[in-house]
């Protein structure tokens, strides 16, 4: 389910729906992390909340939102096929789940970073200066 939600994020154009998908991924990851370690779940919560705060500040601060950053269907297919075709023969199932979740988290945070960098215009100056 997490891989499906992560693939839906790539075709989204609205910042509010994007935030909803990130919150849904956060709930899935938090439920899994609570079984591993409470500290890991807390750190994961802080990282997601910080990323969402940055995303919403840049998306909702200006009225003009550009949607010029789109990832192709091919990239989504590659990311989802990576998780599906990963050979679990050498790993116990629990380690495979941890590895998949951490890899998915790294990919999601990287995509969020790319989106935020694309939304920021370095020639416009400070964010609140209009």
Image (tube, grey):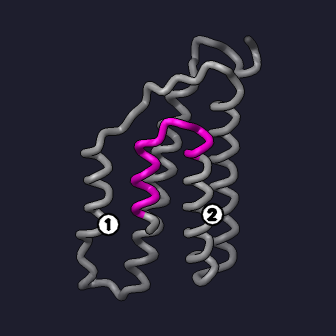
Residue shown at the point (23%, 76%) measured from the top left:
87
Marker disc for residue 113: none
The residue carrying pointer 1 sits among few (fewer than 14), some (14 to 19) or many (20 or more) residues within 10 Å by Cα, namely: some
Taking depth in this image into account, of 5 and 112 the one nearest to the observer is: 5
Q: Residue lying furthest bottom in this view?
A: 92
Marker disc for residue 83: 1
Magenta stretch: give its range. Answer: 3-18
Name the main secondary structure of what is drawn in magenta: helix
Q: Does the magenta stretch include residue 5?
A: yes
Taking depth in this image into account, of 84 and 50 the one nearest to the observer is: 84
Does 58 sit above or below residue 20? Answer: above
* Left or right position of 84 against 108: left
Label 2 element class: helix
Q: Which part of the image, by quadrant, shows the C terminus?
A: top right
Does 111 sit above or below residue 88? Answer: above
Residue shown at the point (61%, 47%) measured from the top left:
19
Q: Which of marks 1 and 2 is in front?
A: 1
Residue 41 occupies quadrant:
bottom right
Residue shown at the point (36%, 88%) measured from the top left:
92
Residue 81 occupies quadrant:
bottom left
Spot occupied by residue 38 in the image (x, y as percentages of width and height): 68, 78
**What is the C-alpha distance between the residues marked 1 and 2?**
20 Å
Q: Name the residue under label 2.
A: 44
Residue 84 occupies quadrant:
bottom left
Dot 1 or dot 2: first in sequence order is 2
């Amino acid at each position: 389910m997490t891989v499906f939600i992560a693939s839906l994020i790539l075709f989204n154009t609205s910042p509010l729906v994007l935030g909803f998908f990130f919150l849904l991924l956060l709930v899935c990851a938090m439920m899994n992390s609570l079984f591993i370690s409470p500290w890991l779940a807390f750190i994961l919560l802080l990282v997601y909340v910080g990323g969402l705060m940055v995303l919403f500040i840049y998306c909702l601060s200006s009225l003009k939102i550009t949607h010029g950053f789109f990832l192709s269907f091919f990239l989504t297919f590659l990311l989802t096929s990576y998780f599906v075709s990963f050979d679990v023969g050498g790993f116990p199932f629990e380690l495979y789940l941890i590895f998949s979740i951490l890899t998915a988290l790294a990919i999601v945070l990287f995509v969020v970073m790319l989106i935020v960098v694309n939304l920021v215009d370095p020639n416009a100056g400070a964010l609140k200066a209009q």
